[in-house]
Structure formats: C-alpha cells, structure tokens
Image (cartoon, rainbow, N blue to C red):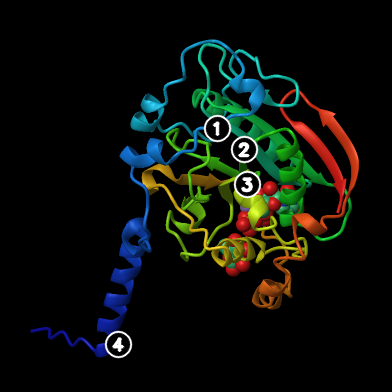
Amino acid sequence: MIKFRISSRQVYAVVGYGLLLVFLLWPDRFASRYEYIDGEEIYDQLVRKTTKNVSLMRNGIRCDYSDVIEENVYLYRRPFTEEIINNNVKLGGEWYPEDCLPSFSTAIIIPYRQREQQLGQFLMYMHNYLRRQRIHYRVFIIEQYDPKPFNRAKLFNIGALIAMKLDYPCLVLHDVDLMPQNLGNLYACSQRPRHMCSSLDVFRYNLPYRGLFGGATAIQSNQFMKINGMSNMFSGWGGEDDDFFARLKNKKIDICRFSPQYSRYTMLKHRKEKPNKDRVAFLRNGHLRYHSDGLNSLVYKEVGYRLDNLFTHVLVET
Ligand code: UDP
Ligand code: BGC
Ligand code: MN
C-alpha cells in the first residue's frame, strides 16, 4: 500500500497556488470597494451647463441622454478601425449635435509629447465615442515642446486656462492612452469632481487606492480655479495627481466616481516613464504651496497654436 504524507510545506504551496489561481481568474475578487454613483443617479448628478454660443443656438429640443446612460453600450474594440463617421468635426476638434440642443460643453484636455501612435488611436476612437454621447466638446492637445522632464500637471493648467477663456464650464483632464470602454460614462462634469477611470484594465479593473485621482478626471472650471489648478512643480512621472486630490481635500471638495460598469477603461501599452525622485517629498510639503503654485504662478511660452482637423494643437515651452 502506498502512503501519502503531506508536509506542511505542501499544504502552504497548495493554498498559495489556489489563491494565485483565484487572483488570476477572478480579477474583481480583490477589488477595493469604493463609494460610487449608480447608473440611475448619473443624470441627476451632472451639471447642465454649456458655453454661451451653444446655449444661444435656437433649435428647440434638448438632447436626450437617457438611452446613452441606460444602455451603457460596450464600444471599444482593439484595434479600433472605424472611420470617423461622417466627418463633420469642426476645425480645432470641436463638435456639437445639430439636431438637438446639448446640455453639456466639455473641454477635453490632453497633455502630450511623443506618443504619435497613441494620439492617432485616441482621436479616431474618441471622436466616435464622444459624438455618440451627443455632448458639445472640443479636444485640446497641449504638447510639451521642450525636452525637459514631462510636466503633466503644468500642461493641464495651460489647457485649462485656454479652455476657460473659451468659456468651457467643464474640463476633462485626460491621458492620451486611456480609452473608455462603455458609452454611459458621459464626458460631462458631475457636481463633485469625478475620477472617471476607477476601473482600469492595467489595475485589473480595481482601484489601487481611494485617493487615486489620475488618468482621466472631470472637474468644473470654477472648482479648478478654486484650488488654484494643479501644481507646476511636478516634473517627471508621478505624484501630481495625488497633489491634485490633496488640493481638493484642502478646500473640502469631495470627489466622486461612477459605478465600475461605467468606469471601465483600457490603457494602450507603453513603457513606464522615469519616476520623479522628488515626488514624495513634493507631495508631503505640497500644502505649503497651494496658494502660490498653480494657475496664479503659471509661466510658459506658447510656441504654436493651430486648429488641426481633429484637435486644437497648442505647443508650449514649459
Ligand atoms: N505623456 C506624454 N508623453 C510622455 C509622457 C507622458 O504624452 O512622454 C502624457 C500622455 O498623455 C500620458 C500621460 O502623460 O498618457 C501620463 O503618462 P503615462 O501614460 O506614462 O502615465 P502612467 O500610464 O504610468 O500612469
Ligand atoms: C503615483 C501617481 C500614480 C499612481 C498610479 C502613485 O504612486 O504617485 O502619480 O497615478 O501611483 O500609477
Ligand atoms: Mn499611461
């Protein structure tokens, strides 16, 4: 007769591999739970506000958004090869529906440098995506021209100032490599600033920590002004979004998220950027600079401003 002896090491190994298997096959299992706005509440949470030129358009009926939210259609395919349907995007990457009066005007602001392929995919997908949402929007690409470490937050500040001058009441601050997968994630501002991409594939659709406020966020222009925008001092990767979150907290502005079904994103593949070694220190003493570092201290040089077919292209030295 053969006798099996199981050592405690083997037991640990079996349990360990079992957990690993659950982890791999069941991505949501270890999701950190977070408070969210459910599908039925989304519309009521949105701030209905447009630029003046759009609100002055006099074609009667208001656009209806209930189908977009309720159906929350899954749209993303990789690669996304759909042509930009009936190419009626205005020069500068602006669009609004012609057959109804939109309730939302959103400036989509993308910090950018040397990601040509991603930019191509982003534009092709997002113009299709956003027009299906029937909102009024305009895409701004804020490109860092100089070779200094990339300064994402400063580029957002620049884009925000330009968009606010053009009367946009709502800013979406968005990485070029993020694609929203479901259509119900309306690119409009909620009353509270919103972390839009809380369910991201590279994090296995989990939220790594509750204070994560990066990737894609929507914030009303007046709220962005109230916190003096973002810091201009984070150059290189990391921390600037955490400082953004801290600024909101400092002004007692709570953030929100939509439920995971509405917040799914996929990130296009790229190599990891070099982290900023000072980011933790900057973050720790960031509160000392909220009033002096931001929109009110923004210095940059505009090297180019061009209305491209699919976006407004602002080239800057940071
Ligand atoms: N970015 C860019 N060029 C760079 C670095 C960053 O255009 O060299 C922009 C781009 O929009 C990108 C965003 O900044 O999506 C955030 O950087 P990254 O994707 O590297 O951050 P992570 O994916 O690590 O959060
Ligand atoms: C960084 C953030 C980043 C997050 C997720 C944090 O450690 O400080 O800037 O968005 O990780 O990658
Ligand atoms: Mn990325």
Mark 3 lies on a secondary structure that is helix
Q: Kindly identify the residue that appears in the image at 53 percent across and 29 percent down.
A: 129
**Which amino acid, by three-letter code, is at mark 3?**
Asn
Q: Label for residue 222?
A: 3
Cβ atoms at labels 1 and 3 below 8 Å apart: no
Residue at 86 percent of width and 46 percent of height? 316
Numbered tag placed on residue 169 in the rendering: 2
| Residue linked to disc 4 | 9
Q: Can you tell me which quadrant of the image ligand 2 is in?
A: bottom right
Tell me if mark 2 has few (under 14), some (14-19) or many (20+) residues whose alpha carbon lies within 10 angstroms of its own. many
- Give the Cα distance between marks 4 and 2: 61 Å
- The answer to whether residue 131 of the structure is visible from this angle is yes
Q: Are marks 4 and 2 in contact (CB under 8 Å)?
A: no
According to the picture, the residue beneath numbered tag 1 turns out to be 49
Which amino acid type is marked by label 1? Lys
Q: Nearer the viewer, mark 3 or mark 4?
A: 3
Q: Mark 4 and mark 1: span between their CA atoms?
A: 63 Å
Q: Residue 184's x, y, as percent? A: 42, 35
Q: Position of residue 111 (x, y in %)?
A: 72, 47
Q: Are marks 2 and 1 in contact (CB under 8 Å)?
A: yes
Dot 4 amino acid type: Arg
Separation (CA) of disc 3 from disc 2: 7 Å
